[in-house]
């Protein structure tokens, strides 16, 4: 048993999330018997320490730290705590022994200025081992040890071999590496990183613990800081520098986290890769295994094998045995006391993949990596610090039998026949309205687009720390998910003056089962009508409210709800705006033409007086500046209303087709509007429209015809294939040809060849554009 | 038999005789699998080199790096050979699969010549054993009448047996190996009840197969299960490729034309061109359409040697024109469609570089040979 130096402070160096550090830490704590434990962590989250240590919580968890400046700028960070994180081990130890524990590092809010000064993308989280692992020393050591990177280097030296060292020897080796790495940085670099400011902060906290009379202080920090802290504590500055203060507000919560999110490879820079694998090794060590990593490799050889088998790879028991043997052999060759994560992956590559490196083998190896990453999610049971909104979310999710797993799940809801499914659906709609990222609807009725053709909803959902974080950041909206959704709905409805947006919020309110929100939204919409001068918005809002009226049962709206009144006012306002459409821009004319047709449908459905509408149309049809698609739609609607016959419509079309230059080019758009509003004009028994069009087109020069052709094609896209067939039949009959025989005409070889060449050319061009 | 010392390419165990002897001294304290001459640690050192020389009888013997690339792959391959599965080296042509298998077998068994050379015409007899028929008639089936083939020899003496281009052999011939590899015993029915040859420790198989060429036969899954697969990838960077070309060209030219020019600049240029055409992207990040033919490092070496020899014998300087002509014929092996790809490379990448150095300028001008 080795002894530890017993100065007033024992500096224990760690790498975040290292099982070996945690194992030695437990021993060191037992040997040193501290009277206080100081931990590198933001000091303004000290309130959370008691909850972190609560046995009701299960790791992985994380401190979620949010900061907002008065300017509105926001920042957030995670501080993950896994079972094998030294920080968590120390906190739990303190709790068990009834010792005080403190975080001593600078508040995250004060670190932000440094973070902003760093190169973008170089660092992803603040409390990381960036300086340690990106030093020149580490680089050279990797080369010398023949490993593929710093993570393998750490594993080889400190995890696989380090667990057999004496604790003081282990601490000395970690310190040696850290100190050599530190040699590679100038003071200026460390200052720019914020490293020195943090160390001064921590040193000051250690000194004040000494000042408070603690005699056996245990200071747990990243190894990079340990010796620097010792020097700073022993040589305090003559004049204490002024502590900076954050200008904004910060708050911190304890949230459930997942192994997947703590994976270094998944973007959490300060973690270790393959957390599930290391968790298994840590647990093996805790239960007294002499070869914990070897045991983890054995269990993962089987786990990866079975995962690959599920993905249709043929991995046999013999392969698994071969992989285990291979891992052990590799460890010996590489001078490691036992195989680790990298030997496991190498062995899987050798023994499970029966082909050369290709896309399939890449995916298989990725899947092996995923297995070693794991998908365990922690939970917070200690209540007190948990944000009410988050706890309501967890409770409701459990009520609706939604799994709290980071793996995505699907759920199908029968919203028509089951009341409990309807409640679950409302809950999921509330969460997606709050933009929590928890769930998204894959299939189901899209009421916002007035589509009620489906009767079941299918949702995909997955829980993650990001979801927790976004729920927490919504916590100012209310204490329950329902309340938050209602507040947000009200907030959004107050922020908009568009009738369309308000009506769509009303539908959202309905699908979220928040009928209480509707009266106020309707009221807001009624008063917005006067100000809203957008024709499309008014028509869409009228459509939405009429839809809500007609789908009252589906949306479970109270009997007292009536959208028809609002819809009526909206329609009136829209009709009054028709004349103004003549001055709208050509860019939006096809959309407005669609809105015009929708307005006609609304009028027809509501059996309202069509006279003002008809008058407005007649007026607009004569205005010279009316954009072509709107003009076409007006012509179509007048035809539908019986104001003009097909000849009248044809005459309007001719005015474009015989037009000069630019005007002629608009004829396609005119026809598009016309066909959209009244497609049946082609097929009325007495209609001479097709014949007339045929004449007109026949008279056009080839160049003119070619210039209108593209738009004509678009116009014809308003018809279904069967309708186009019918139209073709009519055209054929004009020339006394049997339409069927046209289809059976032989195609000349040269034409076919040309067609194929064109096709290939187009494909190549498109492919290139796509590639670029 | 030809005297190996004057061979064009002596076997690995002769070419590196000294290094192997030095490594057996270096290896004193390392654990060796049964039947191995060197430990896995020394085998690895033989392939990827050692930073410091070893003292052998007062002489310092440098263990140079022979394979440039994926070191962990080399380690996996060695451990596979120490286990009970065969090693299958797969990859594109010219990625040094054969060289690796020679290095492994020379280091592990002391010989790299116990080899089946797979072709479409390979039969069972070429793999296991055949008979000396005169002897067979005179004496009946006996050991003297048996003509051992590499698999027989490997099993009997406990040697690594190399199987080159295994996928070129018909599938039914490949399958000869299946039961031998799992049971480690070869049945010789002609010998009656005593007709079993049990493999001695140290026996294993290194097979190579290439993934690009046409006319290969698929391996059965039963056989695949008995091998661990390792992919030998092309050299990862142009800089490394240049080092390899320079080293190998030097070795090759040493005997034939010791004064032939080794022009590092030209080699650098050649390595860059090969590397970029193969990877489909230039060092500046421009996308290039890769030719269909495999442009291996080995090809670059022979291409350079060809150009160097031509300048050596005809007494002219190393001609970039010859080099470009050779590149053209290297690229155009597979399909005529590769010529426009090469031209595109010239106009998109080489042209830009022609203003950066004299050699690139000359190289660009020699583009007339691919017009």
Image (cartoon, coloured by chain):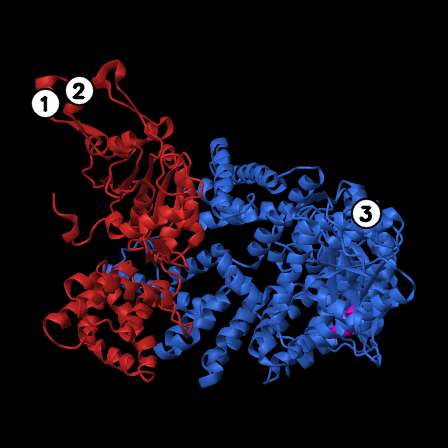
Chain colours: A blue, B red
Q: Residue furthest right?
A: A212
What quarter of the picture does the N terminus of chain A occupy?
top right
Q: Is residue A109 magenta?
A: yes
Q: Which mark is residue A57?
A: 3
Question: Residue A485: x, y in percent?
Answer: 82, 59
Residue plotted at (60% across, 63% down)? A133
Secondary structure found at label 1 = helix
Q: Main secondary structure of the magenta part?
A: helix
Contact between labelled residues 1 and 2, with CB atoms less than 8 Å apart: yes
Q: Which residue occupies the foreground of this view, B39 or A522?
A: B39
The alpha-carbon separation of the residues under discs 2 and 1 comes to: 9 Å
Secondary element type, mark 2: loop
Q: What residue is shown at x 14% (from left), y 24% (from top)?
A: B145
Residue that protrudes farthest toward the front in the picture: B58
Residue at the disc numbered 1: B135
Labelled disc at residue B142: 2
**Is residue A347 placed above or below A506 in the rendered structure?**
above
> Badge 2 sits on which subunit?
B
């Amino acid at each position: 048993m080795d002894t530890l130096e017993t100065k007033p402070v024992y500096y224990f160096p760690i790498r975040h999330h290292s099982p070996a550090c945690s194992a030695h830490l437990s021993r060191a704590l037992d040997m040193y018997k501290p009277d206080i434990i100081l931990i590198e962590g933001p000091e303004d989250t000290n309130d959370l320490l008691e909850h972190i240590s609560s046995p009701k919580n299960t790791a992985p968890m994380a401190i979620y730290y949010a900061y907002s400046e008065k300017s509105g700028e926001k920042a957030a960070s995670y501080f993950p705590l896994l079972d094998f994180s030294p920080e968590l081990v120390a906190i739990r130890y303190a709790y068990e022994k009834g010792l005080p524990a403190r975080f001593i590092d600078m508040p995250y809010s004060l670190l932000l200025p440094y973070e902003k000064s760093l190169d973008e993308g170089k660092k992803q989280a603040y409390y990381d081992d960036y300086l340690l692992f990106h030093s020149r020393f580490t680089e050279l050591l990797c080369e010398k040890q023949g490993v593929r990177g710093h993570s393998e280097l750490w594993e080889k030296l400190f995890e696989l071999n380090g667990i057999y060292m004496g604790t003081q020897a282990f601490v000395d080796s970690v310190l040696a590496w850290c100190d050599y790495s530190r040699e590679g940085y100038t003071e200026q670099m460390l200052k720019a990183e914020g490293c020195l400011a943090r160390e001064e902060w921590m040193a000051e906290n250690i000194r004040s613990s000494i000042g408070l009379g603690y005699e056996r202080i245990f200071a747990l920090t990243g190894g990079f800081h340990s010796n620097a802290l010792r020097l700073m504590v022993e040589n305090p500055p003559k004049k204490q520098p002024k502590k900076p203060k954050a200008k904004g507000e910060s708050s911190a919560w304890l949230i459930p986290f997942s192994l997947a999110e703590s994976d270094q490879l998944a973007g959490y820079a300060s973690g270790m890769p393959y957390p599930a694998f290391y968790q298994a090794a840590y647990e093996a060590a805790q239960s007294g295994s002499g070869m914990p990593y070897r045991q983890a490799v054995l269990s993962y050889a089987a786990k990866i094998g079975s995962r690959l088998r599920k993905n249709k790879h043929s991995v046999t028991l013999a392969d698994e045995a071969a992989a285990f043997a291979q891992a052990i052999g590799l460890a010996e060759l590489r001078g490691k006391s036992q195989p680790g994560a990298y030997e496991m992956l190498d062995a899987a590559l050798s023994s499970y993949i029966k082909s050369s490196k290709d896309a399939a083998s890449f995916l298989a190896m990725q899947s092996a990596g995923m297995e070693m990453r794991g998908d365990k999610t922690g939970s917070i049971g200690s209540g007190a610090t948990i944000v009410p909104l988050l706890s309501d979310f967890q409770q409701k999710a459990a009520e609706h039998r939604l799994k709290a797993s980071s793996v995505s799940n699907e759920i199908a809801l029968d919203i028509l026949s089951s009341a409990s499914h309807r409640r679950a659906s409302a809950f999921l709609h509330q969460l997606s309205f709050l933009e929590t990222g928890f769930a998204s609807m894959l299939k189901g009725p899209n009421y916002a687009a007035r589509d009620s053709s489906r009767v079941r909803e299918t949702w995909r959902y997955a829980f993650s720390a990001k979801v927790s974080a976004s729920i927490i950041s919504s916590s100012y909206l209310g204490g329950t998910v329902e309340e938050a959704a209602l507040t947000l709905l009200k907030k959004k409805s107050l922020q908009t003056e568009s009738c369309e947006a308000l009506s769509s919020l009303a539908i959202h309110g309905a699908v979220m089962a928040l009928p209480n929100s509707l009266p106020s939204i309707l009221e807001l919409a009624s008063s917005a009508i006067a100000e809203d001068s957008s024709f499309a918005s008014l028509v869409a809002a009228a459509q939405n409210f009429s839809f809500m009226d007609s789908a009252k049962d589906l949306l479970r709206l109270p009997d007292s709800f009536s959208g028809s009144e609002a819809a009526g006012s909206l329609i009136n306002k829209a009709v009054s705006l028709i004349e103004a459409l003549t001055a709208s821009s050509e860019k939006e004319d096809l959309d407005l033409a669609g809105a015009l047709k929708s307005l006609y449908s609304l009028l027809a459905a509501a059996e309202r007086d069509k006279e003002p509408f008809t008058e407005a149309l007649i007026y607009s049809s004569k205005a010279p500046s009316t954009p072509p698609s709107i003009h076409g739609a007006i012509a179509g609607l007048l035809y539908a209303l019986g104001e003009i016959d097909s000849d009248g419509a044809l005459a309007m079309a001719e005015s474009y087709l015989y037009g000069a230059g630019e005007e002629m080019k608009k004829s396609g758009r005119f026809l598009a509007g016309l066909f959209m509003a009244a497609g049946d004009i082609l097929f009325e028994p007495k209609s001479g429209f097709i014949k007339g069009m045929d004449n007109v087109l026949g008279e056009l020069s080839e160049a003119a015809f070619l210039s209108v052709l593209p738009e004509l094609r678009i116009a014809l896209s308003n018809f279904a294939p069967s309708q186009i067939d019918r139209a073709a039949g009519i055209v054929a009959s004009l020339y006394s040809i049997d339409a069927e025989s046209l289809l059976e005409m032989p195609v000349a070889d040269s034409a076919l060849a040309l067609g194929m060449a064109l096709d290939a050319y187009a494909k190549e061009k498109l492919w290139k554009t796509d590639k670029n | 038999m030809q005297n190996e010392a004057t061979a064009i390419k002596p076997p690995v165990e002769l070419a590196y005789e000294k290094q192997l002897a030095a490594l057996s001294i270096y290896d004193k304290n390392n654990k060796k699998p049964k039947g191995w001459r060197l430990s896995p640690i020394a085998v690895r050192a033989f392939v990827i080199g050692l930073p410091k020389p070893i003292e052998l009888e007062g002489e310092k013997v440098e263990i140079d790096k022979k394979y440039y690339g994926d070191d962990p792959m080399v380690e996996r391959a060695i451990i596979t050979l120490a286990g009970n599965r065969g090693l299958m080296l797969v990859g594109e042509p010219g990625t040094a699969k054969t060289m690796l298998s020679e290095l492994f077998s020379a280091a592990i068994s002391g010989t790299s010549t116990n080899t089946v050379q797979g072709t479409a015409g390979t039969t069972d007899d070429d793999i296991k054993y055949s008979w000396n028929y005169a002897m067979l008639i005179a004496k009946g089936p006996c050991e003297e009448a048996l003509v051992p083939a590499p698999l027989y020899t490997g099993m009997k003496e406990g040697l690594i047996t190399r199987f080159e281009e295994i996928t070129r052999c018909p599938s039914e011939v490949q399958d000869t190996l299946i039961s031998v590899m799992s049971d480690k015993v070869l049945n010789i029915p002609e010998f009656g009840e005593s007709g079993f040859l049990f493999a001695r420790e140290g026996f294993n198989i290194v097979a190579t197969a290439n993934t690009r060429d046409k006319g290969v036969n698929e391996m059965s899954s039963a056989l695949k299960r008995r091998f661990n697969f390792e992919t030998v990838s092309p050299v990862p960077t142009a800089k490394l490729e240049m080092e390899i070309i320079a080293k190998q060209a030097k070795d090759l030219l040493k005997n034939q034309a010791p004064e032939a020019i080794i022009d590092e600049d030209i080699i650098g240029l050649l390595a860059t061109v090969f590397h970029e055409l193969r990877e489909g992207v230039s060092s500046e990040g421009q996308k290039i359409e890769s030719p269909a033919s495999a442009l291996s490092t080995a090809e670059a070496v022979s291409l350079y040697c060809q150009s160097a020899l031509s300048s050596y014998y005809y007494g002219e300087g190393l001609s970039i024109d010859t080099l470009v002509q050779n590149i053209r014929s290297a690229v155009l092996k597979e399909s005529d469609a590769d010529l426009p790809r090469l031209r595109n490379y010239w106009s998109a990448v080489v042209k830009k570089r022609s203003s950066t150095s004299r050699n690139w300028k000359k190289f660009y001008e020699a583009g007339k040979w691919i017009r």
